[in-house]
Structures are given as structure tokens and as C-alpha cells.
Image: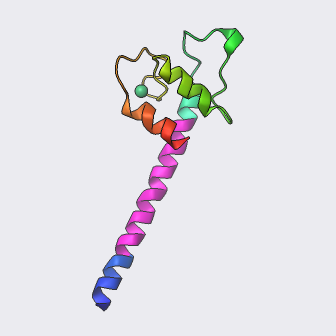
Amino acid sequence: MEQTVQELKQLMREMMLEIGELKERIIYLEREVARRETPPATTSREKIQIQGESYEGIGRIYSEGYHICPFEYGQPRNEDCLFCIALMEKG
Ligand SMILES: [Zn+2]
């Protein structure tokens, strides 16, 4: 029993570390997204702020058929993109 508890604690520690790494990664990806320019379809009248408040905005870009993920940001999207979806869910 004692052994099992120790093992669980060890597992927990490893998971916490992994979660920490994932968080850092998400923050990095968010920064990457924020650094990119707005997609070509967006007019200057309707400039979208990606930093801060507007996850709503990138959700809209996505639903209009463009990538919001750092890999293909602003590119036309033919099918659902897991990276984009992950970003939106995060927000
Ligand atoms: Zn994408």
C-alpha cells in the first residue's frame, strides 16, 4: 500500500511537470499568433486585436474559413484544424 502511494505521488509530480510544460507551450503559441498580421480577408476598418480580450475575434476568423493557429495563421482553411480548435477552446 505504502508503495502504491509513493508511486502515485511520483506520477502526480511527473504530470504536474508535464502540465507546466504544456502551459508554457500554449503561452508561446499564443504569442506567436499575436505576432502574426491579421488575415488578408480582414479590412483595416475591421482590425482584429488578437492580444488581450478578443478570442471572440479569432473565433470569427476561424469560422470565416481561415487558420488562427501559428502554423498557418491567416491561410484559407478547407477543413477543421485541430490546432485552431485547441486555441479557441483554450480561450
Ligand atoms: Zn490551423
Q: Residue furthest bottom?
A: 2
x, y (%) of residue 91? 56, 40
Q: Quadrant of residue 52?
A: top right
**Which residue occupies the foreground of this view, 32 or 7?**
7
Counting the numbered discs, the total is: 0
x, y (%) of residue 42? 60, 12
Q: Is residue 27 within the magenta segment?
A: yes
Q: Residue at x 67, y 17 (%)?
A: 47
Ligand 1: image quarter: top left
Task: Give the magenta part as a residue range.
Answer: 10-30
Q: Residue at x 43, y 22 (%)?
A: 72
Q: With 26 as the anchor, is 50 left or right in this view? A: right
Q: Residue at x 57, y 36 (%)?
A: 31
The answer to whether residue 9 is above or below residue 19 is below
x, y (%) of residue 6? 34, 83
Q: Is residue 86 within the magenta segment?
A: no
Q: Quadrant of residue 78?
A: top left
What's the coloring here? rainbow
**Which residue occupies the foreground of this view, 41 or 73?**
41
Q: With 8 as the anchor, is 16 left or right in this view? A: right
| Most common SS among magenta residues | helix
Q: Quadrant of residue 71?
A: top left
